[in-house]
Amino acid sequence: MVNVYHHQYPVGQGGLHLGIVGDYAYIYDCGGDSNADWNAHLKDINNKIKHCKELHIFISHLHEDHYNKLSKLLNDIESTPKKIFLPYISVIEKIIFICDYIIQKELSGDINREEEQELQQYIRDVKNDENRYETIRHEKEFEKNVDDIILKSYVTNILPNDERRFSKYLQMEGVDVDDLVNQIKTYNKDFWKKAVTAYRKTFHSARVSHKIMLNLYCGMNEVSIRYDDAIENWLHTGDALMKTNKQIEGFKQNFGNLLNNVNQFQIPHHGSEHNHDWRFSVFCTHCWRKFYLTAQDNPPSNSRKFVTPKIDDITLCRCQSIQKISEKPVTNI
């Protein structure tokens, strides 16, 4: 069997995971808190992948705490050939993603210069230069085999009916739907105010962007007959939503019996009950041994409200431990 190595780095709320399978390496998410020891983490990654012939970088979704150190990573790692993968986002979904962000920041009407610059940068990030990145569609998932290990993606998107409803409300607000491609390239306050109004009418709440997610399995490419703790089979979920039967069934249908192998699970959205409820417990009926929760130890007052794990849900699972990955060394909860 090929040698496999995994490490989840303590970067606070966000994520940075390194997996090495033989001479192939992958990174899942590259973002977190600015006070994390990024120089040390990236130096460690550099040392560990020196022998690797290929590096794939997967960004689960375009929320800042999951990609805000990507530029630094790309600058620091020069020798290993690399590709960056993002979930495919349609033009309508990009508008939805940005509206979600605007509401989260509580930006309405006139905003100060600093917030305006931040929003402009976010729009540029979400727009994506697809010459630099490869996008993965649900219809054509990523799959790579290295000896007896498989990497397999699952991309989730906004439901088509929701896209159509949002497009309808955009038209009702007088937004030129045919000009969305141009609008997303520039920052136009009037356009985004109308788009946010259409968003509220369609979804009535924020955080819809959690429905656009690149999830990744890395582990045995066949269902293990015998459970073996020496083999780490990871399931990375970013900030995936797991609150409806349909969402959970999507995971089951895509990954199939490979889910029976999973013994290392990154909890969606830092353990927030916003992203999962009792259905998540039913989903976790497999003997998953470790759960990884990424979170801040002492979040600054201007950050998003600190989210705590919904322990009552997780304890229903037959797992050995729940580990918090923060700025400090890994600790058991």
Image (cartoon, rainbow, N blue to C red):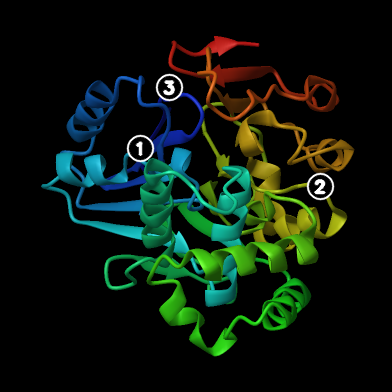
At label 1, which amino acid type do we have?
A: Asn
Q: Residues within 10 Å of mark 2 (few under 14, many from 20)?
A: some
- Residue position for label 3: 10
Q: Is residue 243 left or right of residue 288?
A: right
SS category of the residue bearing label 1: loop
Q: Is residue 56 left or right of residue 62?
A: left
Q: Is residue 154 visible?
A: no
Which quadrant does the C terminus fall into?
A: top right
Residue 70: horizontal and vertical position, in percent? 31, 45
Tag in front: 2 or 1? 2
CA–CA distance in space, label 3 to label 2: 27 Å
- Residue position for label 1: 3
N-terminal of the pair, mark 2 or mark 1, is: 1
Q: Residues within 10 Å of mark 1 (few under 14, many from 20)?
A: few
Which of the 4 image quarters holds residue 225?
Answer: top right
Tag in front: 3 or 1? 3
| 189 vs 127, nearest the viewer | 189
Residue 297: horizontal and vertical position, in percent? 53, 13
Q: Tell me, yes or no, whether the two marked residues, 2 and 1, touch with CB atoms within 8 Å.
A: no
- Residue position for label 2: 243
Which quadrant does the N terminus fall into?
A: top left
Q: Residue at x 37, y 68 (%)?
A: 134
